[in-house]
Amino acid sequence: MSEMFFSEQTEQSAVKAALVAKYFPAYMRVIASAQMRYGGDRIAYIDLFSGPGRYEDGSQSTPVKIIEQAIDDAEMRKRLVAIFNDKDEKNVQSLQTTLNALPNYGTLKYPPQIHHGEVGEEIVKRFESMKLVPTLFFVDPWGYKGMTLRLINSVLKDWGCDCFFFFNYNRINMGIVNDAVEKHMDALFGVDRANSLRAKFADKSLSPFEREAFIVEEMCLALKEMGGKFVLPFRFHNDKGTRITHHLFFVTKNFMGYKIMKQIMYDHSSGKSEGIVNFEYNPADVRQPLLFEFLRPVEDLGPMMLDHFAGQTLDIEEIYEKHSVGRPFVLKHYREILCALEQNGDVTMSRPCPPRKKGTLAPDVKVTFPPK
């Protein structure tokens, strides 16, 4: 089955690779800047389910994209420590061969480490016992075996560590009520949350959309409980757009990483329409409050800010950091709505328009919200 999976790169796989590959250099710049001030000279990228170097159609896999970026950047070349693993020996050989053939591969200070083995308890215990350098951790298993909350937390626990993991929704949706894989579901969600999902799914009247919303909500909450302060889910449909197949979760403890990734997800989303931003996020209602907030239309943003910031004076970055977490809006939405509020006389600004160019909002402009 894995041979079929890697025979060609689907559009969904290309989007997934693009999300990770676009976040990686931005992440590197933020961490490298901090290390220049406070110390540190290494940044890691770890992929324990790496796959081959290329798909059979010639498309590059995500590990190859990451290493190419590192070769092309002077800071990355001297800082990156890459660790790849796959349980399929053919994939390991393919990845090594592809990397060896990259131009200037030998200029990397730390040659990538490529391992062959099953992901399980031993790797989790090793990471749990180590203090990791800042690490971008990518977990993309074929199904769910080996993917656990403990594995994610074993990396996320340390400073500067962010995580992506690809969540096979179809298989997990079936696995929740399958006694044969109960231990895998317990390890993925935690026992209490897995049991909560099983109890909910006893209601046979739940629609597929409701089941999806409950699963993603519980996964987001589980990640937050273990210290993943900021969580972003991104939804993938099948080729015909008729069925949800996967979710990509991004987890970080730092708002800067959240801000960067939200913009990247927004740029790659096909779920944008007039007045609504959903990033192809999950359908939800008030029974899933975390996801419900992600379905807010842009028209809600003005009244929400007027209520939330009543009587306060803040700049655009403060407003964005204090209000955007858990909501689908990106920075440009805040800028556009604040300018519209100013034109309507609902807020005042320290440098009004004109002379400020219409529709723009510089970082130093202070916005004052009226009291309630």
Image: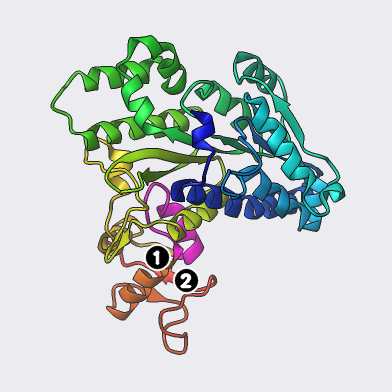
Q: Residue furthest bottom?
A: 355
In this rendered view, identify the residue nearer to me: 368 or 39.
39
C-alpha span from label 2 to label 1? 13 Å
Q: Which residue position is annotated with label 2?
A: 366
Would you place residue 96 above or below residue 177 in this image?
A: below
Residue depth check, mark 2 versus mark 1: number of the one nearer the observer: 1
Q: Residue at x 50, y 74 (%)?
A: 365
The C terminus lies in quadrant = bottom left
In this rendered view, identify the residue nearer to me: 356 or 263.
263
* Mark 2 / mark 1, whichever is N-terminal: 1
Three-letter amino acid code at the position of disc 1: Tyr
Q: Is residue 52 left or right of residue 333?
A: right
Name the element at disc 2. strand
The image position of residue 197, as x and y in percent, is: 29, 22
Total numbered labels placed on residues in the image: 2
Q: Tell me the number on the disc at residue 272.
A: none
Q: Residue at x 37, y 27 (%)?
A: 171
Q: Which residue position is annotated with label 1?
A: 334
The image position of residue 233, as x and y in percent, is: 42, 42
The image position of residue 176, as x and y in percent, is: 33, 20
The crowding category of the residue bearing disc 2, from other C-alpha atoms within 10 Å (few below 14, some 14 to 19, many at least 20), is some
